[in-house]
Amino acid sequence: MSTTSRFLNSRYSALEAYVPGEQPKNRKYIKLNTNESPYPPSPEVISSVTSGSLSDLRLYSDPECTVLKKRIADRYGVLPKNVFLSNGSDDILNFSFAAFGEQGAAYPDITYGFYKVFAELHSVDSKVIPLKDDFSIDASEYYSLGRLIVIANPNAPTGKILPISEIESIAKTNPDNVVLVDEAYIDFGGESALSLVGKYGNVLVARTFSKSRSMAGARLGFAIGSGEIISDLEKIKYSTNPYNINSLTQIAGIAAIDSDSYFFENCKRIIATRKKTTEALEEIGFVVIPSKANFIFAKTDKMSGEELYLKLKDEGILVRHFSSPKISDYNRITIGSEDEMSVFVDTVKKILNI
Ligand SMILES: *Cc1c(COP(=O)(O)O)cnc(C)c1O
């Protein structure tokens, strides 16, 4: 990031912005670095945006997203007042740190990098709790903290799942704080915490259309929680940008829910490819963390994580490497199509002379 101007509010001078995965334009890569879907959105989504809807761009989008909100409520068996729609689920995280972080926040040391950024942005004190050596979350460390609790489940970049019985214990022991469960990857495995929302007034579940519904570029996320929590989030939204979900995205989102079976077939394919890729890597000596997400986290003792990342990049394959010491041996590899993953495995073998 560039240096700051002398005009910047000093509270932001030390802020370290989130660094998104690279989107290089210089050559065509097999992109396994940002957990996008290898498959296009459904045909219904593609035909939903018509020239008529483009003409309607002269109008403001519906700030209440009435139709889309109703579709999501029906799809997940809740009422529209329990649904918050957002410009990507990153907005839910942003708004939640702003709205619910007064007593501080707690989240794992190895998790989605944006939590730390939002905490800093909103001056929320963070208790950062180390994962166990096997990268699992020790739920008991989150009991009775009296802070906003943020857990990605499955976690990123590890892909590990925390059983919902453990999330329930966290919710139960922090009754006066929001427990935000970031389920960006839940459609690829694991049990959702949605069933806890009706039971505990403090559980807020965040979801996104970016991963399982192949719509990362549309920027659409949603949260499900108690009516009170949702109206707090609405308050922040209406105090920043009421039209934060554009009308084309609303139309595409409705079509996506209406063609949900298409997306869930794709999730099944990705889960099958995940298994195949995991087995192929294990066969050549990799350690692969058991994943419930659309990516795997893997290392080899034959080469450092960074070197493998760089060599793959030379060969036209992008994966994500994180330099933080605890995980620098690993790479996070998005599950692409069957073909992409067999090219990936062959390339790894070539790099390692196997
Ligand atoms: C990708 C991701 C998100 C954000 O997705 P959006 O594109 O903003 O909806 C949120 N949480 C985790 C853990 C993610 O990996």
Image (tube, rainbow, N blue to C red):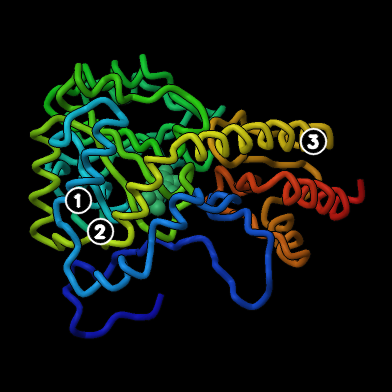
Taking the image as shown, residue 248 lies to the left or right of residue 6, namely right
Q: Residue at (81%, 35%) from the top-left corner?
A: 285
Task: Please tell me whether mark 3 or mark 2 is closer to you in this view.
Answer: 2
Q: Secondary structure at mark 3?
A: helix
Q: Residue at (34%, 19%) from the top-left corner?
A: 140
Earlier sequence position, callout 2 versus callout 1: 1
Earlier sequence position, callout 3 versus callout 2: 2
Q: Secondary structure at mark 2?
A: loop
Taking the image as shown, residue 59 lies to the left or right of residue 31, namely left
Residue 312 in view here: yes
Along the line of sight, the residue nearer the viewer: 327 or 93: 93
Amino acid type at image mark 3: Ala
Task: Please tell me whether mark 2 or mark 1 is closer to you in this view.
Answer: 1
Q: Which residue is mark 1?
A: 65
Q: Which residue is mark 3?
A: 280
Q: Which residue is mark 2?
A: 245
Amino acid type at image mark 1: Cys
Q: Position of residue 186 (x, y in %)?
A: 44, 32
In the rendered structure, are the residues bearing label 2 and label 1 in contact, judged by CB atoms less than 8 Å apart? yes
Q: Secondary structure at mark 1?
A: loop
Q: Position of residue 172 (x, y in %)?
A: 21, 17
